[in-house]
Amino acid sequence: METIIIILFVLGYLAITLEHNLKIDKMIPALAMMSLLWAVIALNHMPVFEVNTELQELEGGSLEAILLHHLGKTAEILVFLLGAMTIVEIIDYFDGFSTIKSFIKTRKKKSLLWIIATLAFILSAIIDNLTATIVLITILQKIIKERELRLWFAGIIIIAANAGGAWSPIGDVTTTMLWIANKVTAAVLIEHVLVPSIVCYAIPTFLASRMSVFKGEIDVVEGDDDKPKSKYGATMFYLGLGMIIFVPIFKTITHLPPYVGMMLSLAVVAAFAEVYSNRKFSISEVSTGSEVHDGSHYSPVHKALSKIELPSILFFLGILMAVAAMESLGMLYHFAGTLNETVPGMGTELHSTKISDLVVLILGAGSAVIDNVPLVAASIGMFQVGTDEPAWHFIAYSAGTGGSMLIIGSAAGVVAMGMEKIDFFWYFKKIAWLALVGFLAGAAVFILIRNFILNV
């Protein structure tokens, strides 16, 4: 039966990876894979285990108990993401992201490159790398007429956004997963990964700034779009970012799961949004009719909730529960042991389990080809080392930044590809080497800091 489980998992994985070729949303194979894996386990009465520091068979072999356990852990991530996505959509409702354009005063291409890259790095750490990429490319489309130049800027944005998401517990889905799973804490993650992430984005940006394409000045396009659509835009922008940043602080103070803090932040942002829209609102109300941006017919909260990417949420549900099925059978646990015995040990001994640096680097390179969410989910199931062990921080860095090496290797790259119609081979030829240099440089800095400065 384990062979059937592996075949189903591999086929589902391939369907997710080949999403663009098959023209099928990756949500579909993820949900199908999850359902079939658990069905095979149930129909064949396969033993399920609780994986902690060792395999422990559940009393009575209760499949329902282990399924409910994994669903609860997955729900924590999904509810957290729903809250963050809603806050971002509320900010967008008030056109709050137009505030970012006020930071762009220069016409020099080189200076603009550093401003855009730095904004991508900082914003992605707060509102996630996907949203940061969308916001900044939208701004670029308003200020740069030359498409070829915008493609170069977009490539650097992808690298910087992925680097920015890697060091923040709220900056990327994979770091959020590690944080919620208690594999990392916010403060120690930042301590270990911030500097390598800065190196990962700064070196490619520096190398790009020396190229001829970033010499000279741009002709800034001015138009009606520069006018703010709401007088509350800046207020909601800073309030939204502030409340998202508040979430790790809330967790540190209360020791409650992160989704609780995110729900509080959403409640605060939603309350201000409702006050500014000057209307009462029931979250259970379903409205129909024409869309009015000023809020006379729609609550901003209702509008934000209607724009949430539910296919992405369902994809995460499918892939995380599918990986949980493999974990519950003990397959990931045994695979991790085999992997660490096979790959040369370049890492350090961690609680009698050695996670090779080479394994983590391969994981990062793999995230450029395969979605990093299932890779990190599998890592959580495979490696049984303690909270804030350097291996988890290295995994956060590698999985977060490795995807920049291919345009299809990260959510930021895929959305940029769609917005600017970036050709896969153009990116591979022009940008991939910059991403590779940044990835390896950041990894080298991480290892140096770990071994010689933090001495862990």
Image (tube, grey):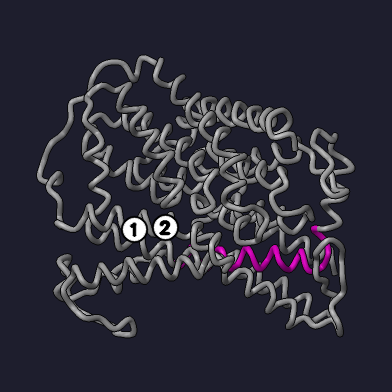
Report the span colored magenta: 310-332
Q: Is the residue under label 2 in contact with that under label 1 (CB below 8 Å)?
A: yes
As helix, strand or loop, the secondary structure at mark 2 comes to helix
| Identity of the residue drawn at 63% across and 28% down | 445
| Identity of the residue drawn at 60% across and 54% down | 373
- The residue labelled by disc 1 is 240
> Which sits in the foreground, 324 or 357?
357
As helix, strand or loop, the secondary structure at mark 1 comes to helix
- The residue labelled by disc 2 is 244
**Image position of 268 (left or right of 437):** left
Q: Position of residue 32 (x, y in %)?
A: 62, 70
Measure the C-alpha gap from mark 1 to mark 2. 6 Å
The residue type indicated by label 2 comes to Ile
**Image position of 141 (left or right of 82):** left
Image quadrant containing the N terminus: bottom right
**Number of the label disc, if any, that sits on residue 121:** none
| Identity of the residue drawn at 29% across and 32% down | 147
| Identity of the residue drawn at 41% across and 62% down | 85
**Image position of 215 (left or right of 189):** left
Q: Position of residue 438 (x, y in %)?
A: 55, 28
Q: Quadrant of residue 330?
A: bottom right
The residue type indicated by label 1 comes to Gly
- Give yes or no for residue 138 being in the magenta stretch: no
> Which sits in the foreground, 113 or 354?
354
